[in-house]
């Protein structure tokens, strides 16, 4: 029966209990049951207080709450509502009594006593419903749960523990926390004790029969996650984690978000502090166009842009399947607040671009469409030129003609001292952006960053597929290193750089420390529950044409300074590298690409980009003898550097 109590029942109960609270206030103040000469004041204050309280409850939403799930927020709402009502009723009565006969008096302490009694009278029934429902829920028979230890006694850990306690059907019993903060040792959070630091984890797992450890540290760096995972592996206990801060953009934490530890968690870096207000102000109410909207970076750009509520998002792609899937996702999540327009178009078609831009008149353009696969572009240089270079030129020309206010091109660290067709083509595209900014005076900028985890063609996905098929895992060289970012982190910084741009800058994202590809492979094997040298091997095949052992972040001669955002650098003199005859040189490249003349393309790129040094099959690092990294003496042979 108590489950059928509704807010209309609470209204009737409030009226009765508030009158009782008014009477009790007079009794406590006068210290007698009979009110005598204070009856008129009692009637006046009672009518005012009951009306003001129910009126306040209605307009502040107290009667719109579902009290089965009441929390501290509801208690605060009740307190504020009763306080406002008491103040209003008191003011009314004191003014009225001033105008009425002098024998009508109201003791000044009555409102204060009433406030406390009224708050209790309205709160107790509501929270009694909540307590009864929780008690009844606990009486249900659920399967016995497994003991869980939570690593991290912060906000996220507390929310995870609370949800487990509220939902016994999850089959998870939080028996303790571990946290490295000395100040938290021995305290209880949600009734669960902090039992020690990370070093105590193996002993706790054994003593408390822990079946699972949950790492609840969404802002912790990858180094910390890695250490906890290693300890859990030694203790032979299952490990789960929650998404990192970049995946928790809504700030919510739920048990159903728990997942296995992935490579992104081990490489997680210190969280980036993004000026969300500046980005939102920059994009809200604008018409924004994203090229490559079906790709890894482009799709995440679309998601994060939609959260800022632009007036219209036009996302453009060449592959109909990826555009179709992305449109369905965006329409379902943001279609009520944002006008979402999918466009199938190729940046190599100037006429198609003109039609799109003239119809939708975008104010801001993010250019993420590009061919990015290094070995494939070495085999297909004409495609790299027509798509990455000519496509960017076409887009810039149309943007200038249709008065696009801002233009942001996504570049790559492979454009620095390029050794590949892909890197050189992106460097040429950067020069075109600088030229457009210089000619127009508009904030047209380029943003460079390294590899992103989870993108299509990512080495991580390749390794996972090789592990799934039984191996071996192939790497091109044991000393091969790359910079890595998560896709959401990279996109957040791109949006931040877009806000900072004033015209012609080249922004470089702080990529942190480089990661050895062989270490990445080892981590993925261990996370898969396999043993190197026993279940699967790693084989070194030799570098491929265009592939460097390590990537560089800065071009010699560019003056880099940190922006007001600590994770973003800017090359303020990037436009000085634009040759005066850039248009003619691009035309030569275009002609060579249309003629499918690979030799002329390489010659044209060398002329345009003096630092371009192709790494061909003859100059690439030769293959090494296949090895198994399970043998330390063979895991890291000395690299052969040309």
Image: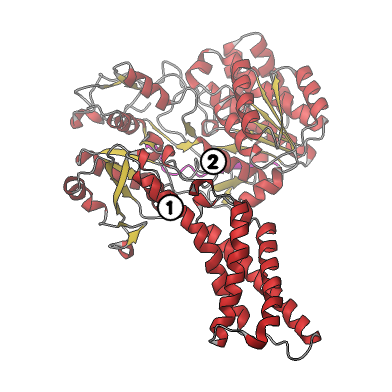
> Where is residue 155 shown, x and y percent of the image?
43, 54
Judging from the image, what secondary structure is the residue with disc 1 in? Answer: helix
In the rendered structure, the answer to whether residue 253 lies left or right of residue 77 reads left
Name the residue rendered at 60%, 62% in the picture.
14
> Where is residue 357 shown, x and y percent of the image?
79, 27
Q: Residue furthest bottom?
A: 102
Mark nearest the camera among 2 and 1 is: 1
Name above or below for residue 328 compared with residue 507.
above
> Where is residue 577 shown, x and y percent of the image?
65, 37
Q: Is residue 280 visible?
A: yes
Mark positioned earlier in the residue sequence (2 or 1) = 1
Q: Say few, some or many: other residues with alpha carbon within 10 Å of mark 2 (under 14 / 14 to 19 / 20 or more).
A: few
Judging from the image, what secondary structure is the residue with disc 2 in? Answer: loop
Q: Reply yes or no: does residue 509 show up in magenta.
A: yes
Q: Quadrant of residue 81?
A: bottom right
Residue indicated by mark 1: 132
Quadrant for the C terminus, please.
top left
Q: Are marks 2 and 1 in contact (CB under 8 Å)?
A: no
Residue indicated by mark 2: 556
The span picked out in magenta is 504-515
Q: Say few, some or many: other residues with alpha carbon within 10 Å of mark 1 (under 14 / 14 to 19 / 20 or more).
A: some
Q: Reply yes or no: does residue 320 show up in magenta.
A: no
């Amino acid at each position: 029966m108590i489950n059928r109590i509704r807010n209309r029942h609470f209204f009737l109960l409030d009226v009765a209990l508030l009158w009782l609270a008014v009477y009790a206030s007079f009794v406590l103040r006068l210290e007698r049951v009979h009110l005598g000469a204070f009856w008129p004041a009692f009637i006046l204050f009672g009518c005012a207080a009951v009306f003001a309280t129910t009126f306040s409850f209605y307009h502040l939403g107290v009667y719109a709450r579902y009290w089965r799930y009441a929390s501290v927020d509801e208690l605060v709402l009740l307190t504020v509502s009763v306080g406002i009502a008491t103040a209003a009723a008191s003011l009314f009565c004191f003014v009225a009594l001033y105008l009425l006969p002098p024998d009508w008096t109201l003791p000044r302490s009555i409102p204060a006593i009433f406030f406390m009694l009224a708050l209790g009278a309205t709160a107790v029934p509501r929270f009694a419903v909540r307590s009864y429902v929780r008690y009844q829920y606990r009486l249900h028979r659920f399967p016995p749960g497994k003991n869980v230890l939570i690593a991290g006694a912060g906000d996220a850990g507390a929310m995870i523990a609370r949800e487990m306690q509220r939902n016994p059907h999850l089959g998870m019993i939080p028996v303790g926390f571990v946290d490295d903060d000395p100040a938290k040792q021995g305290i209880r959070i949600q009734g669960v004790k902090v039992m020690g630091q990370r070093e105590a984890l193996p002993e706790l797992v054994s003593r408390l029969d822990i079946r699972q450890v949950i790492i609840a540290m969404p802002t912790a760096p990858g180094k910390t996650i890695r250490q906890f995972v290693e300890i859990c592996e030694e203790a032979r206990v299952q490990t789960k984690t929650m998404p990192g801060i970049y995946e928790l953009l809504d700030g919510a934490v739920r048990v159903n978000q728990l997942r296995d530890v992935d490579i992104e968690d081990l490489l997680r870096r210190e969280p980036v502090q993004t000026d969300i207000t500046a980005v939102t102000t920059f994009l809200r109410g604008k018409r924004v166009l994203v090229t490559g909207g079906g790709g890894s970076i482009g799709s995440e750009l679309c998601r994060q842009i939609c959260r800022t509520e632009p007036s219209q998002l036009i996302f453009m792609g060449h592959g109909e399947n990826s555009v179709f899937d992305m449109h369905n996702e965006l329409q379902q999540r943001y279609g009520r607040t944002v006008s979402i327009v999918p466009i199938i178009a190729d940046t190599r078609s100037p006429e198609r671009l003109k039609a799109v831009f003239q119809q939708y008149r975008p104010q801001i353009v993010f250019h993420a469409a590009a061919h990015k696969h290094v070995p494939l572009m070495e085999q297909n240089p004409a495609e790299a030129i027509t798509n990455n270079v000519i496509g960017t030129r076409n887009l810039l020309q149309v943007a200038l003609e249709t008065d696009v206010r801002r233009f942001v091109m996504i570049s790559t660290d492979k454009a620095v001292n390029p050794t590949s067709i892909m890197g050189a083509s992106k460097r040429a595209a950067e020069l075109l952006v600088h030229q457009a900014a210089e000619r127009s005076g508009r904030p047209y900028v380029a943003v460079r960053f390294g590899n992103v985890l989870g993108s299509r063609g990512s080495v991580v996905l390749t390794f996972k597929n090789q592990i799934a098929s039984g191996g071996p895992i192939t790497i091109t060289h044991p000393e091969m290193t790359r910079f890595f970012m998560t896709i959401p982190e990279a996109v957040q910084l791109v949006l931040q750089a877009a806000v900072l741009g004033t015209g012609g800058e080249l922004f470089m994202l702080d990529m942190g420390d480089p990661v050895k590809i062989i270490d990445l492979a080892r981590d993925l094997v261990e996370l898969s529950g396999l043993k190197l040298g026993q279940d699967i091997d790693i084989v070194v095949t030799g570098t491929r044409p265009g592939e460097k052992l390590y990537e560089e972040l800065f071009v010699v001669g560019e003056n880099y300074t940190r922006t007001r955002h600590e994770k973003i650098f800017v090359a303020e003199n990037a436009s000085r590298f634009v040759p005066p005859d850039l248009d003619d040189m691009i035309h030569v490249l275009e002609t060579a690409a249309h003629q499918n003349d690979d030799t002329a393309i390489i010659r044209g790129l060398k002329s345009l980009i003096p630092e371009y040094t192709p790494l061909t099959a003859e100059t690439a690092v030769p293959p090494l003898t296949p090895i198994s990294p399970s043998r330390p003496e063979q895991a890291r042979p000395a690299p052969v550097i040309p």
